[in-house]
Image (tube, grey):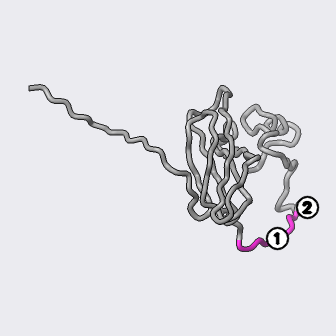
C-alpha cells in the first residue's frame, strides 16, 4: 500500500489594507500596482518604499512616494501608485510604510548637547572629517583611508 502525506501547506490569501493606529506596513511583489489603503485619521498621507538599504552598510534607504490621492471624510483612504522597480538589484518583494497624521512618532523632548571642545588637548585630532556616508568610503583603500598619510593614523 502506497500513501503520500504533505509535509507543508502554504496558504495565500488577499487581505484588506486597513491601517491600525494610523499606520500600515506591508510587503508586496515587485510589479506595477495601485494601492488603496484605508482607515487613516487625516488627509496628510506619508508613504515610503522601505525595500532598499545603502550599499555595503545595511542602513535603510527609504524612498518617499508622492502623489497619493485622498478620499473620504471620516476614515480617510489613500490611493497611490508603485511602479515596478526594474533595476538589476531590485528585490522580488518590496516593503511599504504608510502613515497618517497620528501614525508618526515624535520625540517627547529634545535637549541641546554641550558644545564640543575641539581645542582641548584631551580631544586632540589631526583631522576632522564631516561627511555623508554616500561621499566618503571608510573601507580599507577607500577615500577616507587616503587621508591618513597626510594626518597620521587615527588614535582610536
Going by the image, does 151 lie left or right of 60?
Answer: right
Which numbered disc covers residue 119? 2
Q: Which residue is mark 1?
A: 112
Which residue appears at 21% of the width and 34% of the height?
5
In percent of width and height, residue 94 lies at 60, 40
Question: Looking at the magenta stretch, what is its main secondary structure?
Answer: loop
Q: Badge 1: few (under 14), some or many (20 or more) residues near its Cα, within 10 Å? A: few
Which residue appears at 63% of the width and 42% of the height?
51
Which residue appears at 67% of the width and 39% of the height?
82
Find numbered disc 2 in the image and state the secondary structure of the residue it sits on.
loop
Q: Nearer the viewer, residue 147 or 1?
A: 1
- Which circle, 2 or 1, is nearer the viewer? 1
Q: Is residue 154 above or below residue 75?
A: above
**Quadrant (top left/top right/bottom left/bottom right) for the N terminus:** top left
Going by the image, does 54 lie left or right of 92?
Answer: right
Q: Is residue 125 above or below residue 116?
A: above
Quarter residue 18 falls in = bottom right
In percent of width and height, residue 13 lies at 44, 44
Taking the magenta stretch, the answer to whether it contains residue 128 is no
Residue situated furthest right in the rendering: 119
Find numbered disc 1 in the image and state the secondary structure of the residue it sits on.
loop
Q: Magenta segment range?
A: 108-117
**Distance of mark 2 from mark 1, alpha carbons?**
20 Å
Circle nearer the N terminus (2, 1): 1
Which numbered disc covers residue 125? none
Residue situated furthest front in the rendering: 72
In percent of width and height, residue 32 lies at 64, 34
Quarter residue 24 falls in = bottom right
Amino acid at each position: 500500500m502506497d500513501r503520500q502525506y504533505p509535509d507543508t501547506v502554504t496558504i495565500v490569501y488577499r487581505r484588506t489594507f486597513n491601517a491600525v493606529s494610523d499606520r500600515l506596513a506591508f510587503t508586496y511583489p515587485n510589479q506595477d500596482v495601485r494601492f488603496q489603503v484605508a482607515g487613516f485619521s487625516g488627509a496628510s498621507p506619508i508613504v515610503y518604499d522601505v525595500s532598499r538599504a545603502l550599499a555595503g552598510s545595511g542602513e535603510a534607504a527609504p524612498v518617499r512616494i508622492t502623489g497619493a490621492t485622498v478620499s473620504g471624510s471620516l476614515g480617510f483612504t489613500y490611493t497611490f501608485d508603485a511602479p515596478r522597480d526594474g533595476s538589476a538589484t531590485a528585490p522580488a518583494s518590496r516593503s511599504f510604510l504608510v502613515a497618517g497624521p497620528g501614525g508618526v512618532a515624535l520625540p517627547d523632548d529634545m535637549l541641546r548637547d554641550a558644545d564640543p571642545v575641539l581645542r582641548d588637548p584631551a580631544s586632540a585630532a589631526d583631522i576632522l572629517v564631516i561627511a555623508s556616508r554616500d561621499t566618503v568610503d571608510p573601507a580599507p583603500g577607500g577615500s577616507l583611508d587616503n587621508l591618513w598619510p597626510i594626518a597620521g593614523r587615527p588614535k582610536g
